[in-house]
Amino acid sequence: MYEFKDEFLTGIEQIDNEHRKLFEIAEELYTLKNEQFIPDKYDNIREILIQLKNYTITHFEHEEAYMESIGYKRMFTQKIQHDALREIVNEWDLEALDENQDEAIDEMLRTITDWLVNHILNQDKLIGK
Ligand SMILES: [Fe+2]
Ligand SMILES: [Fe+2]
């Protein structure tokens, strides 16, 4: 469902590897969420969501450090966009997740993956140009 595609490649190895990893985490979450009979599934879902959130924040730090190191001229736009997603993931309430929260989990997964695809294609790809 959430596979990393060649069209996402920026040509910067570390950034591409981190983007790939983000899609792997999203896919893992999607797969787990759709498994039917796993006891205590929501503990694992919570853990993966925390991982997805933390890895996103770490990735932004790395990407911003890289842009700074090359004196990237569109860094300001990047930071504004990163801030917007940082704000969204920081507002996730991960304590309240249980079987009644499937829609909330879907919504988080959809928000972050839509956001990432859009941002990678419209912003991150320009870094390598
Ligand atoms: Fe990125
Ligand atoms: Fe970015």
Image (cartoon, rainbow, N blue to C red):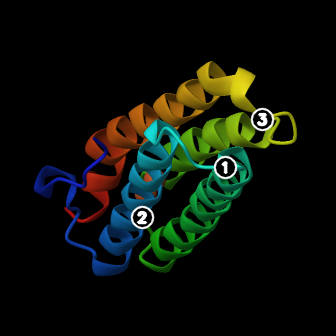
Q: Is residue 73 visible?
A: no
3 or 1: tag closer to the N-terminus: 1
Report x, y in % for residue 107. 56, 24
1 or 2: tag closer to the N-terminus: 1
Q: Nearer the viewer, residue 100 or 3?
A: 100
The residue to which callout 1 is attached is: 39
The residue to which callout 2 is attached is: 72
Q: Is mark 3 within 8 Å of ligand 1?
A: no
Q: Is residue 68 above or below residue 98?
A: below
For marks 3 and 1, give the one nearer the viewer: 1
For marks 1 and 2, give the one nearer the viewer: 1
Which residue is at a point 60% across and 19% down the rendered structure image? 103
Q: Secondary structure at mark 3?
A: loop
Callout 3 environment at 10 Å: few (<14), some (14 to 19), or many (20+)? Answer: some
Q: Nearer the viewer, residue 128 or 98?
A: 98
Quadrant into which the C terminus falls: bottom left
Q: Secondary structure at mark 2?
A: loop
The residue to which callout 3 is attached is: 97
For marks 2 and 3, give the one nearer the viewer: 3
What is the three-letter code of the residue carrying label 3? Answer: Leu
Q: Is residue 2 left or right of residue 106?
A: left
Which residue is at a point 87% across and 41% down the rendered structure image? 95
Q: Nearer the viewer, residue 81 or 34?
A: 34
2 or 3: tag closer to the N-terminus: 2
Callout 2 environment at 10 Å: few (<14), some (14 to 19), or many (20+)? Answer: some
